[in-house]
Image: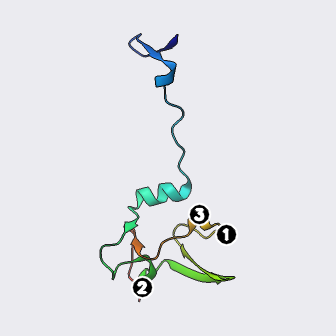
């Protein structure tokens, strides 16, 4: 026994996929703003106006001010990546 589709055909239960994966705020932000590894070394997150870095114990943390600041390592950014919102820091 299975599930019926809109054309009244039976679909086996093992073929039905589970719920779609829910993306986190950070994952959605990366997808929307085309966050990627930079091909141009002069345009990287480290040289962006929105880049914020700070030292916590023995580590340097890098965050994007547009994404928002958190105390989680899940929102750390990679300094050699870039997104479509890049603005050169003066």
Return the disc, 1 or 2, that comes first in the chain's sequence: 1
The percent position of residue 49, horizontal first and vertical second, equals 45, 81
Separation of marks 3 and 1 at Cα, in angstroms: 9 Å
Front residue of this view, candidates 1 and 4: 1
Q: Which residue is mark 2?
A: 89
The percent position of residue 33, horizontal first and vertical second, equals 41, 61
The percent position of residue 78, horizontal first and vertical second, equals 48, 72
Would you call the spot at circle 2 few (<14 residues within 10 Å), some (14-19), or many (20 or more)? Answer: few
Q: Residue furthest left?
A: 40
Mark seen at residue 30: none
Instruction: Give above or below for 87 relative to 33.
Output: below
The percent position of residue 28, horizontal first and vertical second, equals 48, 54
**Element carrying mark 2:** loop
Instruction: Give above or below for 57 relative to 13.
Output: below
Nearer mark to the viewer, of 1 and 2: 1
Q: Is residue 18 left or right of residue 72?
A: left
Instruction: Give above or below for 51 relative to 90.
Output: above
Mark seen at residue 74: 3
Nearer mark to the viewer, of 3 and 2: 3
Q: Residue at x 47, y 17 (%)?
A: 12
Separation of marks 1 and 2 at Cα, in angstroms: 24 Å
Q: Which residue is mark 1?
A: 71
Residue 32 occupies which quadrant of the picture?
A: bottom left
């Amino acid at each position: 026994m299975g599930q019926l589709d809109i054309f009244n055909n039976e679909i086996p239960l093992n073929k039905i996929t589970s719920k779609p994966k829910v993306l986190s705020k950070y994952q959605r932000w990366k997808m929307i703003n085309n966050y990627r590894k930079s091909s141009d070394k002069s345009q990287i997150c480290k040289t962006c106006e929105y880049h914020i870095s700070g030292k916590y114990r023995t580590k340097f943390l890098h965050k994007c001010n547009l994404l928002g600041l958190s105390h989680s390592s899940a929102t750390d950014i990679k300094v050699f990546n870039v997104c479509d919102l890049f603005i050169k820091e003066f």
